[in-house]
Amino acid sequence: MPGDEPHRIVSTTPDTAVVFKPAVVQTPAIITLVIFIARFVAGLFRLVWRHPVALATIAVPAGLCLVYGWRVALLLVVPALVAMGAWAILDRATFARWIGWRMVAFGRWFWIYRRHWQPVMAVAGLARHIRGREYIPRLVKVTSDSWADRFTVRMLDGQAVKDWSDRFENLSHGFGSETCRVSVAKPGQLVLTFPRHDPLATPIAALPIPDTPTVGPVEIGRQEDGSPWLLRLHGTHVLVAGATGAGKGSIIWSAIHGLMPAMHAGLVEIWALDPKLMELSYGRALFGGRYAADPADCADLLDEAVSVMQKRAARFAGVQRSHTPTLDDPFVLVVVDEVAFLTAYQSDRQLRQRISAALATLASAALRAGC
């Protein structure tokens, strides 16, 4: 019975439980059979569409055995396996992209995700039981790469992303992963990412200095999926925050490291503010006369940066909207280590206001002028 009606029912025999039975509609067997066959065909079509390589790898040898016998099948399959092995040795990247990771995705879909999907959804509270029927989110597809498995999920109508993000621990432990990332693919669909290992567990060596001077995105390390981490510096602002020992200095020095060819070419100038004398002092020779540690000197250097910005903005007004580094107008990168040391922790009120005003001016209007 709908709503709050069941609790109002009073049994005349207290020792007898009230039992509710859903209505049963007799369906002809032919209709049930047609529905079953239609669902089977649709599921088979989806399986072939999403995993053609894996299914072909299984179906072709099996079909050859049934039609021509196992000897003929072996003679035809062995050369193909040898060719695949040679491909994997000679060009591992393309083999992994077209064959390897598709096979991995099919195997993990079949043995892990599909097999445990219903119990994990039920225990995690993402399935729903309505009037005796269980509704389960649908697993759409699974893809794999060298870092993680990603599969697309169609949520139940009425579910929110928060329902899934709050249960990331249930999902990660249910599918045997250390963690789970939840992101939105499109309305009604999510992408669940299950990392298989951590590429950042082992520290990497310093990257080689680029051969070509550039102020474009600078490669400063590796992302969690193993791909290059490119940091954009020209035409934007970058704020690096983290706990002590998190590696903030590595980001600063990796960015400077990537800009060194452009610095030697005269296309980049780095102005360094190091009030704690802990991080940027090692590079005084690189910064030339654009290094300041005393708070008053830091304020003077910031005022000079504001002056350069305003002069460039006056020259660029009505001529160009974006800055292109040249020898006459190089890209000026102002690096401030520990901003809070110059603002929130600065005891001199007038100096603190002066520094805050200069930083605010640079943050609001310096992009067009290349600062």
Image (cartoon, grey):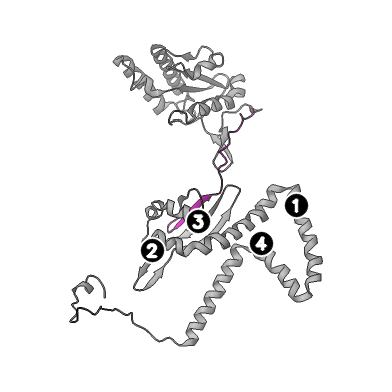
- Please rate how many residues cluster around mark 3, counting C-alpha atoms within 10 Å: few if below 14, some from 14 to 19, many from 20: some
- Please rate how many residues cluster around mark 1, counting C-alpha atoms within 10 Å: few if below 14, some from 14 to 19, many from 20: some
Q: Tell me, yes or no, whether the highlighted magenta stretch contains residue 92.
A: no
**Residue position marked by numbered label 1 in the rendering:** 87
Locate residue 85 relative to residue 110 in the image: left or right: right
**Residue position marked by numbered label 3 in the rendering:** 175
The answer to whether mark 2 and mark 4 are in CB contact below 8 A is no
Q: Tell me, yes or no, whether the highlighted magenta stretch contains residue 186.
A: yes
Say if 269 sits above or below 61 in the image.
above
The answer to whether mark 4 and mark 3 are in CB contact below 8 A is no
Picture coordinates of residue 306 (x, y %)?
42, 19
Q: How many marks?
A: 4
* Whole-number angstrom distance, CA of label 1 to CA of label 4: 15 Å
Which secondary structure, mark 4?
helix
Picture coordinates of residue 265 (x, y %)?
62, 20
Frontmost of labels 2 and 3 is 3
Going by the numbered disc 2, the residue's amino acid type is: Asp
Disc with the residue nearer the chain's start (2 vs 4): 4
Which secondary structure, mark 1?
helix
Say if 227 sits above or below 274 in the image.
below
Disc with the residue nearer the chain's start (4 vs 3): 4
Q: Nearer the viewer, residue 323 or 211?
A: 211
Picture coordinates of residue 261 (x, y %)?
62, 23
- Please rate how many residues cluster around mark 2, counting C-alpha atoms within 10 Å: few if below 14, some from 14 to 19, many from 20: few
Q: Quadrant of residue 210?
A: top right
Disc with the residue nearer the chain's start (1 vs 4): 4
**Residue position marked by numbered label 2 in the rendering:** 157
* Whole-number angstrom distance, CA of label 3 to CA of label 1: 32 Å
Going by the numbered disc 3, the residue's amino acid type is: Phe
Going by the numbered disc 4, the residue's amino acid type is: Val
Say if 181 sits above or below 71 in the image.
above
Disc with the residue nearer the chain's start (3 vs 1): 1
